[in-house]
Amino acid sequence: MKNSKKGFVYTVVDKKTDKVVYVGITKDTLKSRKNDHIKKSRREKKYPFQNAIATLGVDAFKWEANTTLLNNDELAEKEKELISQYILKGNKLYNIDSGGGIQKTIYKYKIDDGSLLKTFDSLEEASKTVNSTKQSISKACLSSTYKHRGYLWSYKFKVPFIQGKDLRKKRVEKLSLHSGEIIETYNSVADASKKTGINKTSIAKVCRGERVSAGGYKWTFCLKDKGYGI
């Protein structure tokens, strides 16, 4: 059974620049999460933010909590949203990915009419029902077709669940990583990859919110085309 305890989003500000440099989520207290980062900063192997604590010192940062309590799915979405917002503002974050990694609810739908069949608390639980792997279920939830083993899978709840258009055929925009300004628009992910030399899988992952940037740019599906999907 998924832990029903709610959590909150917190941000860490560099006192020198007065800018947010890290976005995190926790179901514990802010003090406990802070102490955890400090403890990990003393290890030989550490992540960028923990390395910054080890280098600059814990007093170089200010920790701020958003007091709004959210469930797992809301926490995942809010973390991704804030990371994206700060990057578009030009903040240089220590986050190693685009967020949303907390365990989310998985929805399994019938492929013919989009009706909901079952809800799962974890990818592992969902994968067992179709003799698959949690990686495959996650890939389906984030894909353009949502299909896997004869069903539709998604992290989002909507009945009926109607498949969107193939995102590989949607136009994509290349944006400045710092200002968020649109630099150029391409006919598809493949077209963008061909003209820029940047890996198409990486571009697609940025468009889906799975990673922060690709080739030094932010990427998004064209706003005028966002009538797709669920």
Image (cartoon, rainbow, N blue to C red):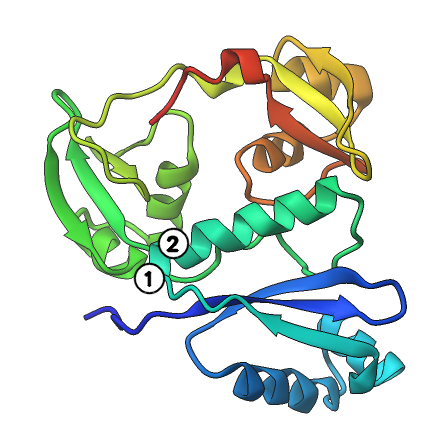
Q: Position of residue 47 (x, y in %)?
A: 71, 72
Q: Position of residue 218 (x, y in %)?
A: 72, 34
| Residue bearing the label numbered 2 | 74
Residue 75 as seen in the image, left or right of residue 185: left
Q: Residue at x 80, y 45 (%)?
A: 90
Q: Which residue is mark 1?
A: 71
Residue 177 is left or right of residue 152, and the answer is right
Up-down: is 89 above or below 174?
Answer: below
Q: Is residue 37 above or below residue 173?
A: below
Q: Quadrant of residue 121?
A: bottom left
Q: Is residue 94 visible?
A: no
Q: Amino acid at mark 1?
A: Asn
**Residue 18 in the image: above or below residue 151:** below
Q: Residue at x 30, y 39 (%)?
A: 154
Q: Amino acid at mark 2?
A: Glu
Q: Residue at x 38, y 66 (%)?
A: 69
Secondary structure of residue under mark 1: loop
In depth, the one of 22 and 171 nearer the eye is 22
| Marks 2 and 1 close (CB-CB < 8 Å) | yes
Query: Which residue occupies the extreme front position in the image?
Result: 67
User: Can the viewer see residue 112 in this picture?
Assistant: yes
Q: Nearer the viewer, residue 52 or 140?
A: 52
